[in-house]
Image (spheres, helix red, strand yellow):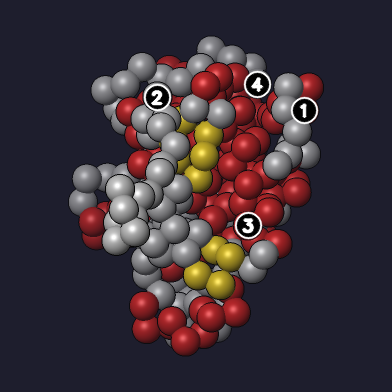
Amino acid sequence: MDQNSLSIVFPYYLNGDLYKYSNPVAKLVEECNAQRVCFQLASTLMELHKEGIIHRDLKPENIMVGFNWKVYLADFGFAIYEKDLKRENQYARVGTLEFYPIEMLNPCFVKNKITYDHRVDIWSMGIIIYELLYGRTPFYTGNEVDTKARIRSLKFGFPTKKHSSSTLVQAENLFRRIFVHPANRITLEEVLAHPWLAPCHNLMKPF
């Protein structure tokens, strides 16, 4: 190392990213750990949105896993200040299809125009938690056209084989409040106060 070199130091996350816990061939994540991930993501996004920043590419590959299910949000390549969204209308659809919210496909705010705001992150967070619990994303079909159609129609359900926990009824209530039109979507504050995340309040504090 000398004056003409530059060293970049990154943290090492022993457990890698969240994807290996969420894909269909992986063992389903225990509900308590999915709750911990949801609580941390909601807390982190709330602070991010307070700074006027939207991540826009939330997915398991962009979440690093540390010790005891401590998670860290990564890859801000598609992040944008909310105030700058108007000049990005021509590039409205960013991110990964399975995690697209309905407002990236349908005009939800302005007639005949695709627009969105920070609430896209709440939807994508919901997709991640759903995948942790059920081993697949709620709108995926294997076909791009059909997946988009399911998102546009808000058509999703819950695998019956996972109904071993009575608290999953609370989780399903949370998903039904996330996968809706943005005007009706639950806020991050409401997510943190949701009954399904009640156990987390005794274990951790919002960031």
Front: mark 2 or 3: 2
* Residue 104 quadrant: bottom left
Q: Is residue 79 visible?
A: yes
Q: Quadrant of the C terminus?
A: top right
Amino acid marked by disc 2: Leu
The label on residue 167 is: 4
Amino acid marked by disc 4: Thr
Does dot 2 land on a helix, a strand or a loop? loop
Q: Is residue 198 visible?
A: no
Tally the numbered discs: 4
The answer to whether 202 appears left or right of 168 in the picture is right
Q: Residue at x 45, y 48 (%)?
A: 74
Q: Residue at x 58, y 65 (%)?
A: 53
Does dot 4 land on a helix, a strand or a loop? loop
Front: mark 3 or 4: 3
Does dot 3 land on a helix, a strand or a loop? helix
Mark 1 crowdedness (10 Å alpha carbons): few <14, some 14-19, many ≥20: few
The answer to whether 9 appears left or right of 2 in the picture is right
Front: mark 1 or 3: 3
The residue tagged 1 is: 201
The residue tagged 3 is: 48
The residues bearing labels 4 and 1 have C-alpha atoms spaced at a distance of: 16 Å
